[in-house]
Every structure is written in structure tokens, then in C-alpha cells.
Amino acid sequence: MIDFLSKHILIFLLILVFSYLSGSLNFAIIISKFVRHDIRNFGSKNAGFSNVVRSFGKIPGIITFFGDFLKGILAVSLSKVVLSKFIFDDKILIFYLYFSFLSCFLGHLYPCYFGFKGGKGILTAWSMSFLIDWRISLILISTFLIMVLVFRIVSLASIIVALAYPIVTCLLNFHDKNLLAFSFIFSSLISVGIILKHVPNIKKLLRGEEEKINIKKR
């Protein structure tokens, strides 16, 4: 791991910058600007997919969904293409891909293009987790959908999935101590970032004020 950094530190830094800038492309904000509004002034004031749907409708929401989903795929995929030319051990490759993952995630939370006020990171994190380990991604999206159906509260489902992420990562990687260590650390950092962004929602949940979705209507 250290050998790659010592020889190709510039490439590694460029990957981090590229991933962060890709993550900073917050499509909830971009799409809302097209209708001459800022999503951060509407609804829950979150620059995310679900708030766009509630505030501006399904079409802007769908565009936001695919935009935020694909930017994560793009960041990690291109990082993988570049890194695979220098790293031939899959475990070491995953280690560096997690840095790309984290950098893109931070870009979504704190986008440099929009005053460092972004979304909460669930969708973007999920898209990138698919490239790291599709099994984890499948478990997380299944958990999210079940929680939404049961509680009808998107923020609660998001918090539960964030808490589950490090646990699922450990369960699927317990056979490999090296992979387990850094995958748990990175997944925990992602989890903490998501939960911190949901602090206002947690307060509303405790007061019983968090909005529920009408599944039948939708």
C-alpha cells in the first residue's frame, strides 16, 4: 500500500481531487436552479432526491436520482481504471478505492460549488458501495426499502441503513482480517457522516414531528 503512494503520490492526489469535484456536483441543487429556485430553501431544506420529489415533483426528482447515483459510479469507476494500471492486488485496490469513495462522499456533503452546503449522502454512498461490494449494496437497499415500507419515514430508514453499513461490512468481510480492518474504518466514517447530517431529523423524530410519506398516494 505504501509502495504505491511513494511512487505515485500525484496520481493519488489527483484521484482524490477528481472524486471530490465529482461529488460536489449536487444535482438536487443544479436541477432546482433550472426552475429558478434553490432546493435548500424548500421542504426539509435538504439538497437531496427525496426533498426534490416533495418540493418540485417526480420528474426533477428522477433526474436528481440518476445524477447523484451516476456521479458516484463515475468517480469510483474512473478511479478504478486508473489505479488498476498500477495496483494488481485486489485488496490493495479496494483500499485506495475507499479513498475515492470517501472523497466523493465528502464532496456531496460539502460541495465546493455551492457554498459547502450539500446533501446527506445516502444515495451517492449507496451507488459507490455497489462498486466496492455489490453484496453490501444489495443488503443496504433492501433494508432501506423495508424500513420505508414499515415506518414510512425516509430519514429514519436512512439512519438505520447508515448504522447497518459498518455492521454488514464486518459480517461480509470477517474472514479477511486485513480487508475487515480498513473496510470497517471507512464504512464507519461514511456512517458517521450520514448520521451527523441527519441530526435535525433525529431531533424531529424524537419530538414525533418527522414527516411520513404516503406510499399509496405515490
Image: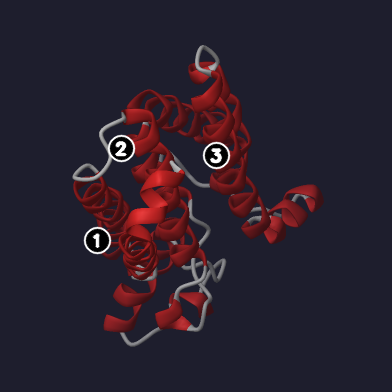
Query: Residue shown at 50%/76% (left/top)?
Result: 40
Query: Residue shown at 53%/25% (left/top)?
Result: 178
Q: Is residue 44 left or right of residue 78?
A: right
* Disc number placed over residue 131 in the picture, else none: 2
Amino acid found under the numbered disc labelled 2: Leu
Q: Vertically, is 30 above or below 126?
A: below
Instruction: Assign a secondary structure to mark 1.
Output: helix
Q: Is residue 146 visible?
A: yes
Q: Vertically, is 149 above or below 121?
A: above
The picture quadrant where one finds residue 38 is bottom left
Q: Nearer the viewer, mark 1 or mark 2?
A: 2
Q: Is residue 139 left or right of residue 36?
A: right
* Separation of residues labelled 3 and 2 (CA atoms): 14 Å
Q: Nearer the viewer, residue 27 or 53?
A: 27
**Considering the image in quadrants, where does the N terminus appear?**
top left
Q: Nearer the viewer, residue 76 or 88?
A: 88
- Which residue matches tag 3? 187
Question: Mark 1 vs mark 3: which is more N-terminal?
Answer: 1
Amino acid found under the numbered disc labelled 3: Ser
* Disc number placed over residue 165 in the picture, else none: none
- Which residue matches tag 1? 63
Instruction: Assign a secondary structure to mark 3.
Output: helix
The image position of residue 161, as x and y in percent, is 55, 36
Question: Mark 1 vs mark 2: which is more N-terminal?
Answer: 1
